[in-house]
Amino acid sequence: MASRDPGFGDLLRPDPSVALAPPAIDPIIPGPAHRAQFVVELIGPRSVPAAQIAPLIQPQWYEALGRPELYCMSPADTCWQPLNPRIDGSYDSVAAAWDVLSPRGTLSSGSASQLLQSCEQFARAVNRRAMGLPEPGDIDRVAKALLQVRDQLDVGVSIAIFPSAGRIPERDLWIACAALGLQFSPDGAFVWKSPQHPNPLFSATPIGDAEAFSLGAVQAGTDHEGVTIGFNVPLCPNPMAAFDGAVRAAEYIARQIGGAAFDDSARPLSAKVRDALRRDLADGVVMLEKATLRPGSASAIKVFGAS
């Protein structure tokens, strides 16, 4: 059976009257994430030629060091830059960084000690010395603390929208999401996103048999039980703005489909419920900031994205 033309025409475009404008967001600045990484800096009183540091990104050293993130700072730099293969110029500072928590496992004090020893071997060859932050012996304690924070504060916000009767054609959801200015992402979600940050503010996905949207589903006339809008708080670059945008998006979609929005406890999204959710979210953001894991920061992404 031949697929049908989805027939969107010019319907897939933002509606200025309802489209969400991304808020100002602090971009992620390259460099070691000390809260979430074991960092070794190669320190010394003088600049070191770039040609002497370039071997760090060659397989012999890079693989031996466990594929760390590598950063450098030239005399004219004001912030860290990713190390590249250049052999001209010189560096005032060089650093290698390993995630304490990663999908591959948890870094141990023993492994950190071995990494520091390998870095010291390289540092001696370029007339520098290696300094680990934190001390390798503290890594087990740091890892345990980060795991506790992750277990306690890995929370999310979720709003579900259901029609008052029947199901929602996926085509209608594409049109509503486009009107809101949401972008279609490679993983099949519609996202509210800022060009200043790699993570979306929130994502919209279907509820029911399918976990993602697709043009093929539109062409096949697929419909859904509902749609959910949500985000992970630690990974979100601006949780408070994301919440406000998610509420606006949920209310708009509910109007478009003749339905209603609910929180993750199946309560209708009344003004009272909305205000309570916002207060709880604000408390969670404060707790993350007290743990020095600001939502959307490089450290928060490394800790909460590693599970």
Image (cartoon, rainbow, N blue to C red):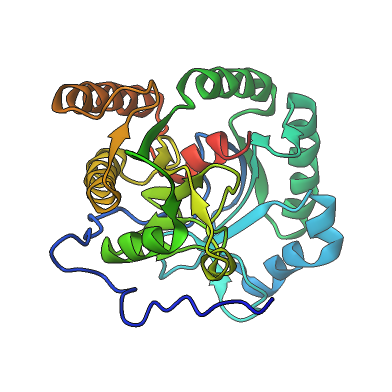
Residue 71 as seen in the image, left or right of residue 245: right
Quadrant in the rendering for residue 166: top left
Q: Pick the quarter of the image with the N terminus.
A: bottom right
Where 92 sits versus 103, above or below? below
Residue placed most toward the observer, 125 or 186: 186
Q: Is residue 219 left or right of residue 136?
A: left
Image x and y of residue 105, in percent: 75, 33
Q: How far across and how far down the image is residue 253, in percent?
A: 28, 50
Question: So how many labels did they put on this image?
Answer: 0
From what the image shows, is residue 96 above or below residue 102? Answer: below
Report the residue at 77% width, 54% height from top. Answer: 122
Residue 108: where, in percent of width, then height?
74, 27
What residue is at 81 percent from the left and 36 percent from the top? Answer: 114
Q: Is residue 145 left or right of residue 183?
A: right
Q: Residue at the spot x=25%, y=58% of the render? A: 22
Does the image show residue 61?
Answer: yes
The vertical placement of 105 against 129, above or below, is above
- Visible in this render: residue 197? no
Question: What x and y, as percent, mark residue 134?
Answer: 58, 30
**Residue at 86% in and 62% down:** 60
Q: In the image shown, does 166 or 99 lie closer to the viewer?
A: 166
Which quarter of the rendered picture does the C terminus lie within? top right
